[in-house]
């Protein structure tokens, strides 16, 4: 290979293995990795948790965890063998060549430093830009304008907490760009953000890449994001690259069963039904060269229950976190009506801060309400506080949490976790073992501690704890968002089975529209604590929808989309609180009229089950 | 079976109370200072417990015929101004020091843990009141507070225990409350609240197992301070009453005769010093093997 050829390669990783020592045993985190990337290309690193994608991102910044070491191979970035660099040389290389956009910019920004100072720190080595106060400010404003942060001049004097999550991520990107890096590494840059914000940030990144033309590496678990952004892709599994190449080709026609399985396990907004889960054993068999057991490919379509009894009826629920009403502000949750029937999965959808979890906490009796009536089953009033509820009521309402890591006590066994509700609510004839079998876990898991289980297994224990009490209503708060896609669908199928067989009504809280499409029977769309649309799942994803629902759906990024749609400017910023009057969505609505700002929108009945709250005539709400 | 399942199988051996105790013990034995610390503490406890068997004489019996003897004969470390055997007094002195210090530390830690648990559980104004009270107690210098208490209630072991509890409960509360606050917002606590569990169940079964390490380290660390404090009080004449064999008291009684019978002062000092060093090393070792960051605790 000629010298000119290697010059052109921004990343050249050859036969890389990264390992750490566990006692006397060597554990390989990455094995036999070879990657090349030219200037101007974008590489996507995809894989599940534990696949080594974050370690790989670290390697590209010439950084390793202290206990890890390069077991073999070389890493050349811009023609420099980075693991041969020491001390000052390494620092200068990092300061001038590579930059990182971290996953959670809110935590990565120093909370006590003004934005201007933090930015100026990043380009300190740039002599021209740091020459005077004026030039420093000018360069900072230039950077913030580049990432489309509104009102850059004023932003320099502000602190990180004064910005929203999306804006913080924009500032994080500006900081990474400050030293004009030749390689930009983005570690899950949009994972914690709402769909609309995510779409807007990705648009900004795509534009920046076009303008500045540096090489980029994007780590993500989201195949849709990778498909939109990256020219090349490398799929990692257990520290090895199982498939790599041009994104279009790899995702369009995947060759490796792992890539195929990963693609098949992602739920789609446009397709109803729960996708099959990824079969790890089959892929292990393929890797060893033994014949693969047959895999299921079919989607499992849920059938909504018909005319079942009501398990939860919420009427006129209002929650205000302010003790006394403040002028100019409005309650966090206002006038919410909601029904859940036996065996039904009702999805409560909205962006962060829309009051989804507040509603769940009110139902659970953990949050006070200002007004509203909650009825359980056939006419049992739910007392506001859990302390005033009878045992039968507490048994009937159970919760499954988002984060399986913290929902189980790390010092107590699985048996303790499951048998406590059984004993407390005097459930007879069900052992901890039975409860585990019910959720698809081996019965001998009872003596394990949560630390000895995988994320998916922990979530199953959390579900077992909730359903073993024999509840009528289960509040499922983002129960699959923390899980890998391959595990996600098996948990969704479990939820579907429990709803059907045990006749449990689920109030399923989520921000993920694809998951909603796959598992929900009815959907309630919440915006700033107000219901904007409500209907059967097919109606919500159908042709007539509220402008907010339309915006959410348009912002979903999936593999195979044409990715040309852009989020119009200004639509990605959620106001900090609901307005005191009028429609809550008025500030972002493309169809906004004068009446929207003053009058609460009327209910439009699109069908007997489908209602939309909007001032616009129904013809205008019809999409294509 | 996937790789992760294999790892889980291997981990199975390390669950439960006894295996984890063994693991902590192994990690303590690996560190020389921690081993030394525990050895010193255990040695002191044994010496104090076995004092009646190994002491050559009666610690409180005066002998006018053998005053201020140098080491030798029936008195391995000599005698003091009243002709009492110094070795016996030193050995018995450990009983007083250990019993009073450990009892008072245990009480202070227990009380502090309960108060801290309640503050963390209820939060709001209850937490505010408890925290402010703790702050105001902590603002008073320990020795001053103890002197006041001893002056009011008189001396004697019960008063010393009371004084230590008053002075140290605040510090324990503050540290344990921070640890408990860390656990309170976790989902498993919310799950317990949603089940309608009572405060006793949540604190004892859900919170306490997760802060046990902090409580243990807190005990070991406070104990070393309390030993010194109790001895200081005796030295100042507010602790043990003569003729109780006590290290602080012995130093106070014999320091003017240091040139005549140096061992009468040195022996209790050496015993006291080794116990305190031992407790400190043990607390450090315990903190390291339990993964509790002691610096963080001290700094609050």
Image (cartoon, coloured by chain):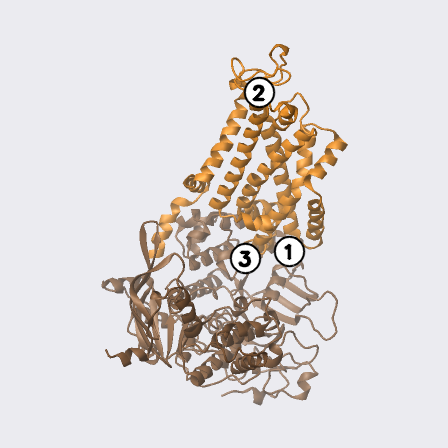
Estimate the spatial distance between the alpha carbons at disc 2 and disc 3, rounded to whole Å. 72 Å
In the picture, which quadrant includes the N terminus of chain A?
Answer: bottom left
Residue under disc 1 on the same chain as residue under disc 2: no
Colour brown, chain: A
- Tell me which chain the residue with mark 1 is part of: A
Question: Badge 2 is on which residue?
Answer: B86
Q: Chain of mark 3?
A: A
Instruction: Report which residue position mark 3 lands on.
Output: A471
Question: Mark 3 vs mark 1: which is more N-terminal?
Answer: 1
| Cα separation between marks 1 and 2 | 65 Å
- Residue A132, relative to residue B143: is it above or below? below
Residue bearing mark 1: A386
Q: Position of residue A227 (x, y in %)?
A: 39, 78
* Horizontal and vertical percent position of residue B142: 68, 40
As drawn, the residue found furthest toward the right would be B152
Label 3: which secondary element: loop
Mark in front: 3 vs 1: 1
Image quarter for residue A230?
Answer: bottom left
**Position of B144 relative to A37 (above/below):** above
């Amino acid at each position: 290979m000629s010298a000119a050829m290697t010059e052109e390669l921004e990343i050249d990783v050859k036969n890389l293995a990264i390992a750490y020592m566990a006692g006397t045993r060597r554990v390989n985190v990455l094995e036999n990795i070879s990657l090349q990337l030219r200037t101007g290309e974008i590489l996507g690193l995809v894989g599940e948790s534990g696949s080594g994608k974050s370690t790989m991102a670290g390697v590209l910044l010439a950084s390793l965890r202290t206990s890890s070491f390069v077991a073999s191979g070389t890493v050349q970035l811009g023609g420099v063998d980075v693991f041969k660099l020491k001390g000052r040389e390494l620092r200068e290389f990092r300061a001038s060549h590579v930059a990182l956009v971290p996953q959670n910019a809110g935590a990565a920004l120093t909370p006590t430093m003004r934005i201007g100072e933090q930015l100026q720190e990043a380009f300190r080595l740039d002599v021209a830009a740091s020459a005077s106060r004026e030039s420093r400010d000018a360069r900072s404003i230039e950077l913030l304008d580049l990432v489309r942060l509104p009102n850059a001049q004023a932003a320099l004097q502000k602190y990180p907490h004064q910005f929203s999550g999306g804006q913080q991520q924009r500032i994080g990107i500006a900081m990474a760009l400050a030293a004009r890096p030749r390689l930009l590494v983005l570690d899950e840059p949009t994972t914690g953000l709402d769909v609309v914000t995510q779409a807007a940030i990705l648009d900004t990144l795509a534009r920046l890449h076009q303008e500045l033309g540096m090489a980029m590496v994007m780590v993500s678990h989201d195949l849709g994001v990778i498909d939109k952004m990256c020219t090349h892709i490398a799929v990692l599994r257990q520290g090895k690259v199982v498939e790599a190449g041009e994104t279009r080709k790899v995702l369009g026609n995947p060759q490796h069963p792992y890539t195929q399985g990963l693609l098949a396990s992602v739920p789609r907004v446009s397709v109803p039904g729960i996708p099959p889960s990824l079969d790890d054993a089959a892929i292990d068999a393929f890797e060893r060269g033994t014949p693969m057991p047959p895999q299921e490919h079919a989607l499992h379509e849920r059938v909504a229950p018909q005319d079942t009894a009501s398990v939860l009826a919420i009427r006129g629920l209002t929650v205000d976190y302010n003790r006394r009403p403040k002028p100019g502000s409005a309650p966090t949750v206002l006038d919410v009506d909601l029904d859940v029937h036996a065996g039904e999965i009702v999805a409560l959808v909205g962006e962060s801060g829309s009051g989804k979890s507040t509603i769940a906490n009110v139902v659970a009796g953990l949050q006070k309400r200002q007004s509203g009536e909650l009825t359980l089953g056939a006419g049992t009033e739910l007392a506001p506080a859990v302390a005033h509820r009878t045992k039968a009521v507490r048994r009937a309402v159970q919760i499954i949490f988002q984060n399986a890591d913290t929902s189980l006590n790390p010092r107590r066994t699985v048996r303790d976790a499951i048998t406590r509700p059984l004993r407390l609510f005097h459930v007879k004839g069900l052992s901890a073992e039975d409860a585990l079998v019910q959720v698809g876990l081996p019965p001998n898991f009872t003596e394990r501690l949560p630390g000895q289980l995988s994320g998916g297994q922990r979530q199953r224990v959390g579900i077992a704890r909730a359903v073993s009490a024999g509840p009528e209503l289960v509040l499922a708060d983002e129960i699959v968002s923390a899980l890998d896609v391959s595990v996600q669908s098996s948990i969704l199928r479990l939820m579907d089975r429990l709803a059907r067989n045990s006749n449990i009504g689920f109030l399923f809280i989520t921000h993920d529209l694809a998951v909603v499409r796959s598992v929900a029977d009815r959907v309630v769309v919440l915006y700033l604590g107000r219901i904007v649309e409500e209907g059967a799942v097919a109606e919500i994803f159908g042709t007539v929808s509220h402008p907010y629902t339309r915006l959410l759906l348009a912002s979903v990024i999936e593999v195979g989309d044409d990715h040309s749609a852009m989020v119009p400017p200004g639509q990605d910023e959620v106001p900090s609180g609901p307005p005191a009057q009028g429609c809550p969505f008025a500030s972002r609505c493309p169809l906004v009229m004068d009446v929207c700002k003053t009058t609460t929108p009327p209910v439009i009945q699109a069908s007997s089950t489908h209602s939309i709250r909007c001032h616009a005539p129904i013809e205008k709400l019809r999409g294509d | 079976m996937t790789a992760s399942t294999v790892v889980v199988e291997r981990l199975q051996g390390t669950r439960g109370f006894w295996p984890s105790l063994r693991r902590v013990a192994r990690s303590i034995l690996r560190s020389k200072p921690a081993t030394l610390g525990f050895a010193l503490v255990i040695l002191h406890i044994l010496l104090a417990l076995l004092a009646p068997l190994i002491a050559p004489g009666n610690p409180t019996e005066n002998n006018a015929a053998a005053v201020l003897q140098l080491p030798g004969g029936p008195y391995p470390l000599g005698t003091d101004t009243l002709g009492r055997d110094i070795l016996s007094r030193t050995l018995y002195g450990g009983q007083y020091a250990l019993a009073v210090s450990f009892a008072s530390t245990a009480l202070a830690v227990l009380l502090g843990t309960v108060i801290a648990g309640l503050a963390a559980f209820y939060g709001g104004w209850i937490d505010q009141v408890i925290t402010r009270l703790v702050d105001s107690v902590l603002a008073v210098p320990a020795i001053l507070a103890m002197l006041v208490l001893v002056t009011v209630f008189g001396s004697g072991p019960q008063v010393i225990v009371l004084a230590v509890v008053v002075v140290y409960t605040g510090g324990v509360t503050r540290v344990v409350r921070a640890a408990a606050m860390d656990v309170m917002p976790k989902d498993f606590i919310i799950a317990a609240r949603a089940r309608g569990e009572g405060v006793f169940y949540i604190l004892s079964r859900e919170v306490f197992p997760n802060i046990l390490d902090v409580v243990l380290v807190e005990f070991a660390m406070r104990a070393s301070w309390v030993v010194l404090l109790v001895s200081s009080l005796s030295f100042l004449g507010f602790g043990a009453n003569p003729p109780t064999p006590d290290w602080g008291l012995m130093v106070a009684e014999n320091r003017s005769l240091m040139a005549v019978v140096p061992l009468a002062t040195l022996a209790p000092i050496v015993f006291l010093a080794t116990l305190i060093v031992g407790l400190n090393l043990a607390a450090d070792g315990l903190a390291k093997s339990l993964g509790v960051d002691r610096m963080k605790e001290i700094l609050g």
